[in-house]
Image (cartoon, rainbow, N blue to C red):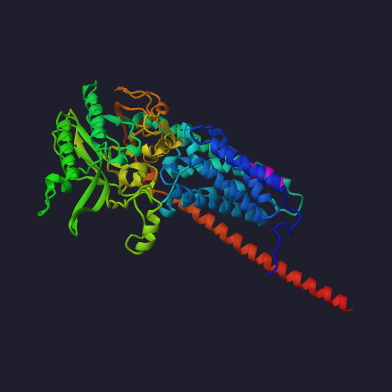
Amino acid sequence: MTEIPDDYRAGRVALSWSTVIGLTLITMVMLTLMQEPMGWGFLAWVALLPWVLATAGAKSGGRGAIISYVFGLAYYLINLYWLIPVTPPGYGALCFYLAWYFVLTGYIMRRVYQRRRWPFTFVLPVVWVGQEYLRAIIFTGFPWLFLSHSQHENFRLMQVCDLFGAYGLTFLVAMVNGLLCDLLLRPLARRNVQRPHLGALALIVLTIFCLTDAMLYGIYRVNQGQQTITEGPTIALVQEVIPQYVKESGESNEEIFARHLRLSEQTLAGVPRPDLIVWPETMTCCPMNKEFLELQAPGFNLDNFTWLQHSRDFDKRLRELAGQGSAVLVGTPAVQMGQIEYELRPLRKWNSAILYLSDGSKYARRYDKMHLVPFGEVVPFRQSCPRLYRLLNSLTPYDYEYTLDAGKDPTVFTYEDQQERAWRFAVAICYEDVMPQVPRRLTVERGEKRVDFLLNISNDGWFVTGAKDEPIKPSAELIQHLVICKFRAVENRVGIARAVNTGISAFIRPDGIVQEGFLEGNLPEKARQRQAVAGFATDKVYLDTRVSIYSRVGDIFAIICTALAALLLLDGIRCQRREKKTIQLQMNKNKHKFLKIKKM
């Protein structure tokens, strides 16, 4: 079939390549500046406009797609730079994959602009929410750099997330961008391009109506929270500065443990005294699960098993710490050992959280992380295709096999404070607070809250730089991770306390506000200043009796938008094929007439 240029109709916009490149570059710069650490969130309301104008008005759809991909790739390579020290191959593969979403979104917008009278005011937010949702679930998901994340300081608008999740706020931001596209793109066409069914005034009124409703809803929920949000138990967050290269050496386990222990003892000397002390993810370094500590291996001299001896020593010291009257939650590896040939080796491994109660005993259950990070904690095809598994394992940040087992169910921990009040909480480990479905599952069961608050324990020591004896430099990941966690608090109306190695440890209220001051502690009061500094913070975690709509129905709004975006994609493909077929028939007909005239 003869190749037909996309601009065969003279009526539509036909932008020069320099204009397309310039507009696309402007969008990528604004998408970068609107996110933390710059945090120029106001740019989000116009950030998509230049690129949509470019991708819809480019002379050729194919060349426009190449420009979108190249600049989209550059955008992700720049903004996800903090993944380079973790896994350079994985970083590159992720960025090459994510850039395709600009191509997909651009194709849909271009086809709608050329062949339909549907307003971008509604099409753009539907398509953009759809691609964000796909990014959040495909390959276990990477829900980072959302439009909504740029609005984390827009306190009242952010409250709409308890209805539709972070996707609801993305929809509003993209809606304003779509309105501007309708006001600017359609009039630029010379002739023959169909205008939207709705006029400019109607689109403006509908957009203002949606924004006003969202703002009024936010004001209502904030005022309602004054009655429903109350103070909860006193919690102490321990934050050390342990870069990942120190942890991986395995030579500093005692030092790492001792530093956390010293900070924990400082929290007990403060006023008020905490009811619960929280350590970050895997900061015990050695396994602390019961099966490992009580290991029996006939035929092996366990007295020479240094790993086990360290674990038993750490367990004893943690029991003594908790026995002073405050429960202690620690992030720890958990291991099931077994005999392989003539060696004692780990058969199964988990990333876990274990609770020591205030009498020095252990809580009966532990929590095993359910959502594992691909290529960081788990590599696919381990059983089904060992050769491919070994190849993919080379993309991990480890020089040895490090595949964990996923936990199956949430664990609700219960402990009593000094007034003998019982409190319930669940733990999201590492990036589980980034995945919307995990905190929702931890918080609510059958439409009712199963916990009073959430804990997030994380090791963000992966994302700081600096060699031995050099200052530790934090990356953008630290503040962006905190920002995303704020959305989980609002979505589920639950208070969250974060204990994060290298930072940013924080208390987040159920309305998304990060508590800036502490009752006791030596960490900086401002959240942004708690990066790559050691210390502790003791404060109240806040509780909320409300159960949100989002907690009950989940991502149904985003799923609907994704389904609509898929229909738009199929419609665009169908129209393009039919159009090319029609043009080909017309060209063949003209060719036949030309040959007939020539014979005459």
Q: Position of residue 298 (x, y in %)?
A: 9, 54
Residue 464: % across, % down: 40, 35
Classify residue 207 as left or right of residue 558.
Answer: right
Tell me which segment is drawn in magenta: 180-187
Q: Nearer the viewer, residue 532 or 9?
A: 532
Q: Residue at x 37, y 59 (%)?
A: 389
In the depicted view, which residue is nearer to us: 300 or 281?
300
Q: Nearer the viewer, residue 556 or 413?
A: 413
Whether residue 233 is visible here, answered yes or no, is no
Q: Position of residue 342 (x, y in %)?
A: 17, 58
Q: Is residue 94 magenta?
A: no
Quarter of the image where one finds residue 262: top left
* 291 is higher (above) or lower (below) than 263: below
In the displayed orientation, state which residue is furthest to the right: 600
Above or below, comparing residue 258 to residue 66 in the picture: above
User: Is most of the magenta stretch helix, strand or loop?
Assistant: helix
Q: Is any part of residue 262 visible from this angle?
A: yes
